[in-house]
Amino acid sequence: MANRNTSKYYYFNSLSNLKELPIPLSQVQCVPYKHEILICGGKDERACYSYDTLKNEYKFICEYPSDVKLDGHCVVKLVDNNSQITLLSFGGSGYTNKHTLVMKYVSVWSGENKEIEKSKIYNEWVPFTDNHNNSVIIGSNYDNYTGVRAVIGGSNNHLLFITCFPCSISVFDLNTFKFIKHDTLPTDNWIKFHCFVLKSENGQMIKTNEQNYQMLLFCSKAGLSIEYNEDKNTFNFHKLPVCDNIASLNEYAYVCINDAVLFFGGHNRGKKIISKALHKYSIQESAWVILKNTFSIPLYNCFGILNESNTHMHIIGGNTSKDSVVSTHTKIDVNEWRDTSNLLKNEIIIAIQYWVRILKIRLGWINDFNRIIIKYIRGFELLMTLQAHSNAVSSIRFSADGCKILSASYDKTIRIWDVSSRKQLQIFIGHTDMIFSAKFSPDELTIVSCSKDTTIRLWDANTGIELMQFKNDFDQIWDVDFSPDGNYIASCSRNRIIKLWDVHSGIEINRLSGHLRSIWSIQFSPDGKIIASSSDDDTICLWNAKSGERVRLFKGHASVVTRARFSPNGRFIASCSFDTSIRIWDIETGKEWKILRGHTNKVNDIKYLQDSQTIVSCSNDNTIQLWNVESGKKLEKVT
């Protein structure tokens, strides 16, 4: 098959070196987990570490058992949930004992897991066992699993697809603990330390039809598209082009994202030439492009991995020569090399609709306009304009499914809009002065609002009927928030007092005091245990929701702190201020972690995206800006 090279080049600027690994590592295996990258040993190195992508720090997890020799092993993720993941590690040549181990991992960064981490059940490699607790070893004594590669797939993610030397592909059923298929790859190349990936969307194996799943394999001159029919238990192979520049290379790192596979480094068979080049294979176009950027040093035996939110690629460890193992750790911004110029118009529209749904942006305090404006974050086009309010729009909230918008206004009304039809579904009338905030309850059956008229009101979201009124005897109420379980409401006001209310009875159950001036915003933490408040006194406070005691005080802003928001993982607070800055605070340490600068006027509101990696902000400088939390850099500006 003729190779398809192209003269098109990409150039990106965001190739940055991170903190070095605790030890030099080659042939390392890594798995993403939330905001961590789990580094699971390397050639002749049994130590495992967690890298925190937000803190740019490492922590030791454990070591492989002393009788395990690592030389081109493979690690895959078996199970993933909110509190832990399960990893599977296997490998070994025909000349060494094979290992097949599992680790149930809970984060070593969370203080709440200290007792769990001490348990031998967690954060240790233990034998892989069947349903009768019998040890299971994947592979026979004759299989050479040095440089083995594997992926998880199938209808229930129960199949382990294994490709290994010399040119074998097998299917291991993780439910029955048996091999169900062995086949030979149609290539003259030996397969070892190769590229083997799922053709996937959002990490899920793509079905080419009702029964077939597709994988891609590259090794030296070999390029294969592999289709597996689960019902018939058969493979189909199709050859793919391999560009001349990469055909002579082996032991490169690779990352698959969306429609592309990106390759880093590598060496020729004799290791006389070690590459520092980057190549890209477009799956849809079945074509190669060469990236202009190169690493600062030539590398092979390095490992490529995406963080879990797919915003950055990490290149970890490797060799610069046969005897030189390095501890380098490099990061690349995905958006810098992704080419969007060829997106079809319908693809752009789909992307816009997707981001509108997941952003759930609160534009907030748009004092110069009487309309709600939603823009696609990459600046493609104005998506919609909703008009009905007769005064400034003070608050905007999306429903959890992204299908509805809740708006509040200085015109004393609250409205619900249907996103798809762009029609007003409901109007809530009752407040006698301007409304500062309105929010859905967690079950979205109720709406809470607060106003300059010194009242908090609960509304039936479907009928528009007022259900209850909470009266503040002192001053206008500037913000309200439901607890995650929906049983309580927190409110803050100009009189420096935070109040907690019982939703069902309407009774005030606690008062929190400590701020020296007016309180602008209030929010419950994701677990409901902590309340964050921001104030005119230039500070952010954290409060114990049960006892009412202040547990943290953050100082650093030079003017009014308009908003303080928890990250979705509950580990950080982001705040914005009249001083034009956005600051991120580490809740555990109580210290300022990062400052984001770029706005030229007061920053009125901020919000984390669900990945905890991105922040949206809006300002009196008439811009909405998107920020990468990890790098502190501005991603996009919408004007």
Image (cartoon, rainbow, N blue to C red):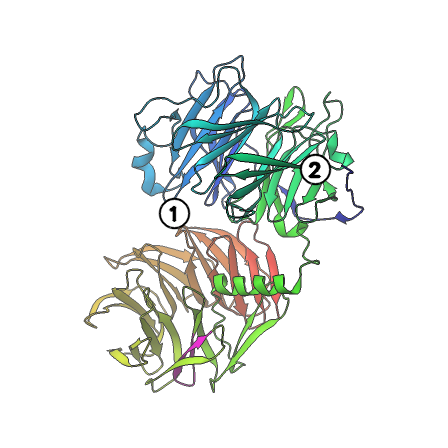
Of helix, strand and loop, which one carries label 2?
Answer: loop
Residue at (61, 27) in percent of width and height: 193
In the picture, measured across the screen, residue 297 lies left or right of residue 161, that is right
Residue at the outermost top position: 95
Residue at (73, 20) in percent of width and height: 270
- Is residue 24 visible in this depiction of the protein? no
Residue at (53, 46) in percent of width and height: 207
- Is residue 332 visible in this depiction of the protein? yes
What are the residue bounds of the magenta stretch? 406-418
Between 175 and 561, the one nearer to me in the picture: 175
Residue underneath mark 1:
588
Spot occupied by residue 396 in the image (x, y as percentages of width and height): 45, 72
Residue underneath mark 2:
295
Q: Are marks 2 and 1 in contact (CB under 8 Å)?
A: no
In the picture, measured across the screen, residue 321 lies left or right of residue 436, that is right
Between 321 and 378, the one nearer to me in the picture: 378
Q: Is residue 346 magenta?
A: no
Mark 1: which amino acid? Glu
Between 633 and 293, the one nearer to me in the picture: 293
Spot occupied by residue 470 in the image (x, y as percentages of width and height): 25, 77
Of helix, strand and loop, which one carries label 1?
Answer: loop
In the picture, which quadrant includes the C terminus?
bottom right
